[in-house]
Image (cartoon, rainbow, N blue to C red):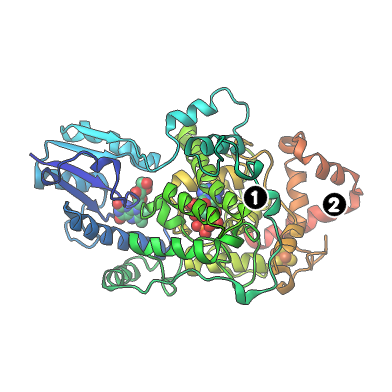
């Protein structure tokens, strides 16, 4: 009798929990390209192409490893269009005695999966996804009773759990848990030394998928012209090794830097592979730690990188599942403006936004500070509806799945959870962008001007944002200084800022 094992597009790991302990000759693995997943938001074309191609390659890898795979393509004329519809068809084909699945990365899909047992009258075993360092129980135990869920303390627990960067006595290597103070250097003046990620030439499988996506998803955002993602575990491992060899050493120094026409800098470009299962986060961290132990990377870079993975990545996942499906509806600042059209075509005179959005549409990629301090910061201080902002991030990044995207967007970047995730909003004027990038040197706006037609819109909107939200944010201790500065401004200055900000906002929302 057959065991049917559905494998989703972000479960592309040979060691997936659903496969564990199952006899290969009794199992049929079901992989499904379905419209519901390709269109539940208007995903970037390159994101769809990446996932479908990685799925098709993974099916081959599973077959090579001895599994039987039943693979349903998107253009199969009988395709039912959803996981549940395809499971129904597969049950007709294989008459399984039971179904085993690994839990998905999204409340939406989890709700559908939890109905399968009743709907199909076949026993369904849903297994934890254990490709993470922290279990839900461990996260809840850590979070329980705490007033604030600060990442830094959670991260120390994960260091202790994994033993990463600990000495023989269990103390942090170098004496500190966190070396972030060494990690905020402005961009370097050495563009020729900037490493570039590997580019993977599309093979026949990827080319077929690119054709399919071009035909079927022409109205989705983004371009396929620059498609260069790895689509196999072997190629993803090559990018991992390439990053460790060529970029890790300066990852820390330039983590927050931004430069015109340099989309990648010293970042790893590994999130798409980690999130769909082609790479294992702990193996990556161990390889990075080894580079430090071998003297090939400094501690500030190594610790900073490992913190992103066992700290931030695990922490946002914990928040997503702990806060529940309603988290997506929060809107602590009652922001309601629609998302500006230029978030899709980059047609704006604000050079920083043009750069961040342009590379996003080209590559399905922007690094963290671009997401947080350019597109995120702008949406926050312009008062854009956080749900619309969330949908945009979910659409346009090749690494975006709700468990990781939503807390980053709604919580960290838009402060829509009222401060659960961030102790103060990540709002800034043009000053911060000017100090961390060369963007302002190429912009028609003047980053030093505070009001008037040439004033950097971030300057206007920053103060207008604080002013508009004083009832919610005015008591935040971490904002005491800017509110004091605002209070000291002459009424006529305040009025000028309010009027200029309103004029600017109306210029793209009317
Ligand atoms: P690097 O800079 O090389 O960092 C290494 C790894 O650390 C990343 O690959 C990623 O796995 C992990 N990481 C770093 N920061 C975070 C973080 N805040 N949360 C989770 N993991 C982190 N990351 C996603 O993977 N998917 C998303 O949908 C996503 N949406 C985001 C939305 C917003 C508004 C913001 C501010 C951040 C978002 N991030 C998201 C986090 C971060 O921006 C990306 O993980 C990172 O830019 C991926 O590029 P990289 O692989 O080159 O990362
Ligand atoms: C994102 C995505 C896309 C675009 N397409 C598919 C698909 O056709 N088949 C599939 O199995 N998974 C796809 N995915 C990933 C799923 O949306 C993801 O597995 C769920 O959101 C659960 O995290
Ligand atoms: Fe962005 Fe303002 Fe600098 Fe222009 S001047 S790049 S809008 S921060």
Question: Residue 446's x, y, as percent?
Answer: 79, 68
Q: In the picture, which quadrant includes the C terminus?
A: bottom right
**Does residue 204 appear in the picture of this structure?**
yes
Q: Nearer the viewer, residue 297 or 279?
A: 297
Q: Is residue 120 left or right of residue 178?
A: left
Q: Mark 2 — residue?
A: 495
Q: Examine the rendered structure and indicate whether residue 123 appears above or below residue 223.
A: above
Looking at this view, name the residue that lies furthest to the front: 168
Could you classify mark 2 by the number of other residues whose Cα lies within 10 Å: few (under 14), some (14-19), or many (20 or more)? few
Q: Could you tell me how far apart the alpha carbons at marks 1 and 2 are, in whole angstroms?
A: 21 Å
When asked about the image quadrant of residue 124, the answer is top left
Question: Residue 42's x, y, as percent?
Answer: 42, 58
Q: Is residue 501 left or right of residue 14?
A: right
Residue at screen point 67% across, 67% down: 350
Question: Residue 362's x, y, as percent?
Answer: 49, 70
Residue at screen point 85% across, 50% down: 494
Looking at the rendered image, the disc whose residue lies closer to the viewer, 1 or 2, is 1
Q: Nearer the viewer, residue 35 or 91?
A: 91
Q: Nearer the viewer, residue 379 or 64?
A: 64
Q: Secondary structure at mark 1?
A: helix
Residue at screen point 26% across, 41% down: 18
Q: Is residue 240 left or right of residue 37?
A: right
Q: Examine the rendered structure and indicate whether residue 498 appears above or below residue 472.
A: below
Question: Residue 225's x, y, as percent?
Answer: 43, 75
When asked about the image quadrant of residue 238, the answer is bottom left
Could you classify mark 1 by the number of other residues whose Cα lies within 10 Å: few (under 14), some (14-19), or many (20 or more)? many
The label number, if any, that marks residue 380 in the structure image: 1
When asked about the image quadrant of residue 157, the answer is top right
Q: Secondary structure at mark 2?
A: helix
């Amino acid at each position: 009798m057959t065991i049917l094992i559905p494998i989703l597009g972000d479960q592309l790991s040979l060691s997936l929990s659903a496969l564990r302990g199952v006899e290969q000759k009794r199992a049929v693995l079901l992989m499904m390209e379905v419209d519901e997943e390709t269109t539940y938001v208007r995903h970037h074309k390159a994101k769809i192409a990446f996932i479908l191609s990685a799925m098709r390659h993974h099916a081959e890898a599973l077959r090579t490893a001895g599994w039987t795979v039943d693979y349903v393509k998107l253009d199969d004329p009988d395709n039912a269009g959803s996981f549940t519809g395809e499971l129904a068809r597969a049950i007709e084909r294989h008459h399984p005695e039971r179904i085993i699945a690994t839990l998905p990365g999204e409340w939406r899909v989890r709700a559908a999966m939890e109905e399968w047992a009743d709907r199909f009258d076949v026993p369904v075993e849903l297994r934890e996804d254990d490709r993470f360092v922290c279990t839900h129980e461990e996260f809840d135990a850590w979070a329980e009773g705490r007033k604030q869920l600060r990442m830094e303390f959670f991260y120390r627990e994960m260091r202790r759990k994994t033993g990463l960067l600990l000495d023989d006595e269990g103390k942090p290597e170098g004496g500190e848990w966190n070396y972030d103070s060494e990690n905020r250097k402005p961009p370097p003046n050495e563009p020729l030394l900037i490493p570039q990620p590997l580019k993977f030439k599309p093979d026949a499988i990827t080319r077929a998928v690119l054709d399919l996506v071009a035909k079927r998803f022409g109205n989705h955002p983004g371009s396929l012209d620059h498609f260069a993602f790895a689509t196999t575990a072997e190629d993803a491992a090559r990018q991992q090794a390439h990053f460790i060899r060529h970029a890790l050493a300066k990852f820390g120094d330039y983590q927050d830097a931004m430069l015109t026409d340099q989309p990648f800098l010293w970042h790893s470009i590994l999130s798409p592979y980690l999130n769909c299962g082609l790479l294992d986060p702990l193996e990556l961290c161990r390889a990075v730690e080894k580079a430090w132990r071998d003297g090939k990377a400094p501690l500030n870079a190594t610790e900073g990188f490992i913190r992103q993975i066992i700290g931030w990545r695990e922490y946002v996942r914990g928040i997503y599942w702990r806060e529940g499906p309603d988290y997506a509806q929060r809107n602590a600042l009652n922001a309601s403006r629609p998302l500006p059209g230029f978030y899709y075509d980059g047609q704006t005179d604000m050079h920083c936004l043009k750069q961040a959005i342009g590379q996003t549409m080209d590559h399905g990629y922007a690094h963290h500070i671009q997401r947080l301090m350019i597109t995120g910061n702008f949406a926050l201080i312009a008062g854009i509806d956080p749900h619309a902002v969330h949908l945009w991030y979910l659409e346009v990044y090749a690494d975006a799945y709700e468990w990781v995207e939503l807390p980053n967007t709604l919580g960290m970047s838009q402060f829509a959870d009222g401060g659960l995730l961030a102790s103060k909003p990540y709002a800034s004027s043009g000053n911060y962008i000017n100090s961390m990038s060369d963007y302002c040197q190429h912009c028609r706006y003047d980053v030093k001007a505070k009001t008037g037609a040439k004033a950097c819109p971030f300057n206007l909107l920053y103060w207008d944002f604080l002013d508009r939200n004083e009832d919610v944010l005015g008591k935040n201790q971490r904002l005491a200084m800017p509110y004091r500065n605002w209070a000291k401004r002459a009424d006529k200055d305040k009025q000028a800022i309010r009027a200029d900000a309103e004029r600017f906002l109306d210029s793209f929302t009317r």
